Image (cartoon, rainbow, N blue to C red):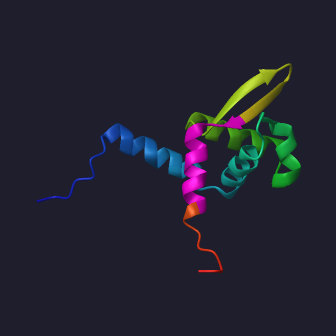
Amino acid sequence: MPAEHGLTDDELAADVQMLTALGSETRYEALRLVAEYDDGVCGCQLEPALGVSQGAVSQALSRLYSVGLVTRRKEGRWRYYSTTDEANRLLSVLDGTRTSDDE
């Protein structure tokens, strides 16, 4: 009898897309940085912290947006990004997988 995981094909595909999006150091670090801001952060503010080009930051944020890990809003010519509840839960779970030196 084959094992079953209980996910639909669409759910499985969405999970894989999300995990793939986090598989890039730039995208993962960008998500971590965006999560530090309560009211959103302009993509232009992430460029120095990530040490990559503005284009690479824009691509990373677009990919995170496309999988539902960040939201974006436009103010004038700038876009501001915030993490979604789903992203915050995912980051929290990842944080919980680390063991402390005290253990």
Is 41 part of what is drawn in magenta? no
Is 89 in front, or is 34? 89
Q: Which residue is drawn at 85% across and 53% down?
A: 49
32 left or right of 86?
Answer: right
68 left or right of 25?
Answer: left
Vertical comparison of 77 with 46: above or below: above
Quadrant of the image occupied by residue 87? top right
Q: Is residue 8 visible?
A: yes
In percent of width and height, residue 61 lies at 70, 40
Q: Which residue in the rendered view is the most extreme toward the front?
A: 102
Q: Residue at x 44, y 41 (%)?
A: 14
In percent of width and height, residue 74 lies at 77, 22
Which region shows up in magenta? 82-95
In percent of width and height, residue 35 lies at 71, 45
Q: Residue at x 56, y 47 (%)?
A: 89
Is 91 in front, or is 67? 91
Vertical comparison of 53 with 99: above or below: above
Q: Residue at x 63, y 55 (%)?
A: 24
Say which quadrant the C terminus sits in: bottom right
